[in-house]
Image (spheres, helix red, strand yellow):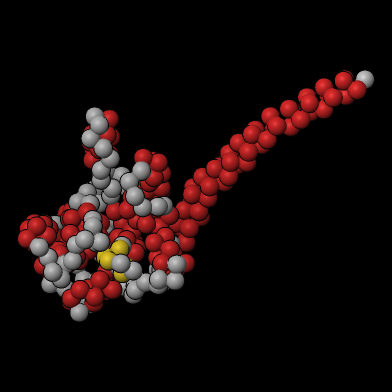
Amino acid sequence: MAQAKSKTKKKSRGGAQAKKPRGRVRRWLRRGLLAVAVVVLLPIALTPLYLAPVIHPVSLLMVKDLVTLDGYTREWIDYEDMGTALPYSVVMSEDGQLCAHHGVDWDALNTVVQDALAGEGLRGASTIPMQTVKNLFLWHGRSYVRKALEVPLALYFDAVMPKRRILEIYLNIAEWGPNLYGAEAAAQHYFGRSAKSLTARQAALLAVTLPNPATRNPAKPGSGLNRLAVIVERRAQQAGDYVGCLKDGGG
């Protein structure tokens, strides 16, 4: 009898030990599903609210700066008060097909996918809607997972939001330097003037700074940055139909 009881106890302990790993797996699975649900449902809920002009969204980087007590500089500016030099420069530098696509530039994305499959690594092809949802709802750093989330979120964001409002939000949450966000704060910081008062060259310099604000300084551009700015300035001045959706009556 004693031996039987001992065997029973060993079996019960063995069963309990087997259940512990399974329990941990289930807990982590639940946590993972909850995280995915938050990433998906939060943008779905917030995007319609961001249609209201009185709401001034903040990016996750801005939230991080607040949480870490670093603080940040950002002065919201309505699209109508930006002038056209900076918005057009940013579009022609970052997403020339903004008015033609529906959140995702499939041709550019397909090229990126093909390059990745060929072993050339993950690179850009993010549209302005994709960059906006990344800044608002996702994390930074190149990642296949984040890129996979960007695509449906950008399609949804673009379906709900007019292009002009998307660009307005993007230009007010884009990072232009450490703890420095938005077009107005950037214009004041680098050139001592409002976004609307920027010259065509200053606007182009700010636009070509966006891909790497940590290392690029539009107020002290090197020869490479100046060359890019000349190209973007020319494109912005000849934008025409490329920015048709941003004009009064545009989509």
Direction from residue 139 to residue 31 in the image, left or right: right
Snapshot quadrant of residue 237 = bottom left
Snapshot quadrant of residue 223 = bottom left
Residue drawn at point x = 45 percent, y = 67 percent: 68
Q: Is residue 246 visible?
A: yes
Residue drawn at point x = 33 percent, y = 46 percent: 142
Snapshot quadrant of residue 116 = top left
Number of on-image labels:
0
Give the image location of residue 3, x and y in percent: 87, 20
Residue drawn at point x = 12 percent, y = 65 percent: 221
Give the image location of residue 123, x and y in percent: 25, 43
Direction from residue 82 to residue 12 in the image, left or right: right
Please identify the residue farthest to the bottom as the structure is shown: 192
Direction from residue 136 to residue 4 in the image, left or right: right
Direction from residue 58 to residue 171 in the image, left or right: left
Give the image location of residue 170, x and y in percent: 32, 61
Quarter holding the N terminus is top right
Quarter holding the C terminus is bottom left
Residue drawn at point x = 40 percent, y = 72 percent: 71
